[in-house]
Image: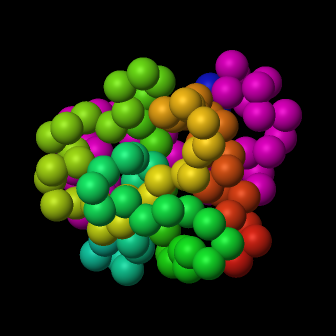
Amino acid sequence: SDPAFLKMSVASERAGHVIIVPRGPRLVEFLREKRCEGFVVAALEQTSTSVLLCSETKLPQRMVLLVGSEQHGLPVWLVQSGLIDLFLELPLLGRTGSLNAHVAASMALWHYRLQH
């Protein structure tokens, strides 16, 4: 319903179910609800336990994908909360340490779409 989002998405928001959840208590509540419903909570974040997202990586069909903010990624409290079941990392070459959040999210969703 956000006019700016609808204009940018050029109707692509109809191809998937995108929800923007506020930070803090509502986010924690949302993630707990989704886990109870059988969803796997995955996050695009570089951690020591991240799985490299490649053609062999199997993504769960029922998945919530968390994408952090530009520059800072996901908040440390969320990464350490135990609410995230799977950390995903994109393979990068050269000196690039990370991608813009929207680019990384697009790549992860493309991998998901190939499988489901």
Viewer-nearest residue: 1 or 56: 56
Q: Is residue 28 above or below residue 71?
A: below
Residue 111 appears at what percent x and percent y?
Answer: 68, 64
Q: Is residue 57 above or below residue 78?
A: below
- Residue at left 77%, top 34%? 9
For the C terminus, the quadrant is: bottom right
- Residue at left 46%, top 42%? 67
Viewer-nearest residue: 82 or 57: 57
Q: Is residue 61 above or below residue 93?
A: below
Predominant SS along the magenta part: helix
Q: Is residue 99 left or right of residue 75?
A: right
Range of residues picked out in magenta: 3-32
Residue 61 appears at what percent x and percent y?
Answer: 56, 78
Q: Is residue 58 above or below residue 26?
A: below
Residue extending furthest toward the right: 10
Q: Report whether residue 83 is seen.
A: yes
Asked if the magenta segment contains residue 11, the reply would be yes
Residue 43 appears at what percent x and percent y?
Answer: 40, 53
Q: Is residue 58 left or right of residue 27?
A: right
- Residue at left 48%, top 68%? 63
Viewer-nearest residue: 43 or 13: 43
Asked if the magenta segment contains residue 21, the reply would be yes
Residue extending furthest toward the front: 94
Q: Report whether residue 112 is seen.
A: no
Number of numbered discs:
0
- Residue at left 60%, top 36%? 94
